[in-house]
Image (spheres, rainbow, N blue to C red):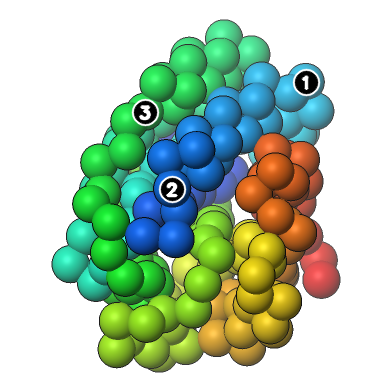
Amino acid sequence: MASSDPLTVDLALLLAVDCSTSIDSGDFRLQMDGLAAALRHPALAKAIAGGEHRQIAISVMLWSDRRTQHVVLSWTLLAGVASLEIAAQRIAVIERRSQPGGTGLAAGIDYAARMLETLPFTADRRSIDVSGDGQDNEGGSAAASRDQAVLRGITINGLPILSGSPSLESYYHTEVIGGPGAFVEPAAGIMDFRETILRKLLREIGRPSV
């Protein structure tokens, strides 16, 4: 039976999306359209309804260099098809706010973890969903940032976009993901983002065991 407490969610999920120089305007649009399409997929609503509280919350944050992070969708409750459609519409029209810059992955993880530390509601699980197409090149340590987040009870999952960097999947495994059930769901290229983000969201909502 679902909880009667509207301020408790099964999952608080921070979607941290790469907007560094290597992500051009077309790539950015594909990411936002892919996220919107995933939220509209019937399987996602079914997965959310299968949770104890039958609701999750998401927020979307864009990151590029170590000084640049922007929240473009504040914490939004997802509990049923109508709320998923509203969130999808908001994400579909998000404009790129980050200026081109380096890949400040470690700083992006730090920022996302702070957001999850100051939630305005209770969450049974807290996760960061990191998507990107490169390693940190801004002098940060993604592994150190990951370790600090995990110590706070946060899980980090990764969606590396592998085109031009086949070693990125290994980097995400060793330097980015962490916490209970953490996993990597790679996309071969940006054109595969749409299908990959849906698979990733379904795994995250469904409590991955490996």
- Sequence order check, earlier mark of 1 and 3: 1
Amino acid tagged 2: Asp
Residue 30 lies, in percent from the top left, at 57, 36
Element type at marker 2? loop
Q: Decide: marks 2, 1 in contact (CB < 8 A)?
A: no
Q: Bin the neighbour count of mark 2 within 10 Å (Cα to Cα): few under 14, some 14-19, many 20 and up.
A: few
5, above or below 144, in the image? above
The dot on residue 42 is 1
Q: Is residue 120 left or right of residue 17?
A: left
Q: Nearer the viewer, residue 198 or 95?
A: 95
Q: Nearer the viewer, residue 67 or 126?
A: 67
User: Residue 41's quadrant in the figure?
Assistant: top right
Residue that badge 2 annotates: 24
Q: Nearer the viewer, mark 1 or mark 3?
A: 3
Amino acid tagged 1: Pro
User: Residue 103's quadrant in the figure?
Assistant: bottom left
Residue 171 lies, in percent from the top left, at 61, 84
Which quadrant of the figure contains the C terminus?
A: bottom right
Count of marks, rendered view: 3
Residue 27 lies, in percent from the top left, at 52, 44
Element type at marker 1? helix
Q: Bin the neighbour count of mark 1 within 10 Å (Cα to Cα): few under 14, some 14-19, many 20 and up.
A: few
Amino acid tagged 3: Ile
Picture residue at 49% right of the left edge, 78% below the top = 135
Q: Decide: marks 2, 3 in contact (CB < 8 A)?
A: no
- Sequence order check, earlier mark of 2 and 3: 2
CA separation, marks 1 and 3?
A: 22 Å
Residue that badge 3 annotates: 94
Q: Nearer the viewer, residue 158 or 42?
A: 158
Q: Is residue 189 visible?
A: yes
